[in-house]
């Protein structure tokens, strides 16, 4: 694919990094994740950039990982063969999901996610790596992967973002949270009219950009450190290993084979929505 999957632009002291696969709701392909990383590197190196906005082109912020790779419909990439083994899958998810996401969480400059439409599973994980989240009033958050055998996604953001009890409900039911509910729970900072999303995110970025960069960096880092003292990073390390174990259970491997036998994502989602129904013995 030749067209960039991530766009980069700067205006005054704000860099905007935009996931650019609107035709597939910004599903995160390996290429997109690599380009995202490169865009953050670029923003890091540019001393003129004080704040980064992370956005998604089109109607949706991100539908999460590119599931087409899981049903063998995506372009082969470097990881295709590797992730067929538990060792390779571990490495793939550590490098491409865990490390890349925590790198954004620890990015030295303040970051703002501008979220509209669907923000699903790894899309939610990615948004939560940003320091602030501005949601359009049409934003909808969900992580419906448990019925597909996934133990959440690679970083368990939910307890930190929603509180323990809501996190359990959100994950175990796969139900969605709308923008107002997300604001009430503290998952997002602001809810704005969908047509004003980028304008309002830039307005917020402009306010943050008034803080001297070193001060912003230190305060951000100190707040992240507070979260670490509360156990965030070690709970994430634990969850990542538990998540890997779950990928390799007989249950998950059987479901993966079944997914590969499906020819469209629509069928995969129909399987998911049906759930793990118990077949009575006969
Ligand atoms: Zn995984």
Image (spheres, rainbow, N blue to C red):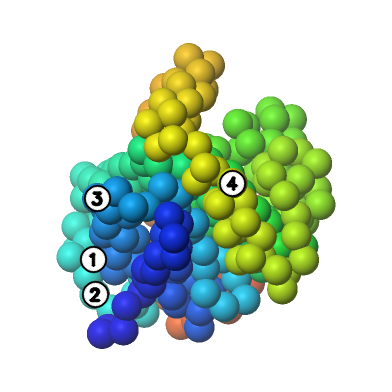
Q: Earlier in the sequence, mark 4 or mark 3?
A: 3
Residue at image mark 1: 80
CB atoms of marks 2 and 1 within 8 Å: yes
CB atoms of marks 4 and 3 within 8 Å: no
Residue at image mark 4: 207
Discs 4/3, front = 4
Real-space Cα separation, disc 1 to disc 4, in angstroms: 43 Å
Q: Secondary structure at mark 4?
A: helix
Discs 1/4, front = 4
165 relative to 103 in the view: left or right: right
Q: Earlier in the sequence, mark 4 or mark 2?
A: 2
Residue 196 in the image, given as x and y percentages of width and height:
70, 68
Discs 3/2, front = 3
Q: Earlier in the sequence, mark 3 or mark 2?
A: 3
Q: Is mark 3 within 8 Å of ligand 1?
A: no
Residue at image mark 2: 76
2 relative to 112 in the view: left or right: left
Q: Quadrant of the C terminus?
A: bottom right
Residue at image mark 3: 45
The residue drawn where x is 48% and y is 26% is 219
Q: Secondary structure at mark 2?
A: loop
């Amino acid at each position: 694919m030749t067209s960039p999957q991530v766009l980069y632009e700067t205006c005054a002291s704000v860099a905007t990094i935009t996931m650019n696969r609107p035709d597939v709701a910004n599903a995160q392909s390996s290429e997109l994740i690599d380009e995202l990383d490169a865009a953050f590197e670029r923003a890091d190196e540019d001393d003129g950039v004080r704040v980064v906005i992370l956005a998604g082109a089109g109607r949706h912020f991100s539908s999460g990982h590119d599931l087409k790779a899981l049903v063998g419909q995506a372009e082969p990439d470097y990881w295709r063969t590797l992730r067929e083994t538990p060792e390779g899958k571990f490495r793939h998810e550590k490098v491409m999901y865990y490390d890349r996401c925590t790198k954004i969480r620890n990015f030295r400059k303040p970051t703002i996610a501008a979220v509209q439409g669907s923000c699903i599973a790894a899309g939610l994980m990615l948004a939560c790596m940003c320091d602030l989240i501005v949601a359009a009033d049409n934003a909808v958050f969900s992580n419906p992967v448990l019925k597909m055998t996934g133990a959440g996604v690679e970083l368990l953001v939910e307890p930190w973002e929603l509180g323990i009890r809501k996190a359990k409900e959100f994950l175990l039911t796969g139900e969605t949270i709308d923008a107002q509910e997300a604001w009430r729970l503290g998952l997002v900072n602001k809810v704005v009219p969908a047509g004003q999303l980028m304008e309002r995110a830039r307005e917020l970025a402009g306010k943050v950009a008034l803080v001297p960069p070193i001060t912003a960096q230190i305060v951000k880092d100190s707040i992240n450190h507070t979260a670490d003292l509360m156990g965030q990073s070690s709970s994430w390390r634990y969850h990542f290993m538990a998540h890997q174990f779950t990928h390799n259970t007989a249950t998950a491997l059987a479901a993966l084979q079944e997914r590969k036998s499906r020819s469209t994502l629509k069928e995969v989602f129909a399987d998911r929505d049906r759930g793990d129904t118990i077949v009575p013995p006969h």
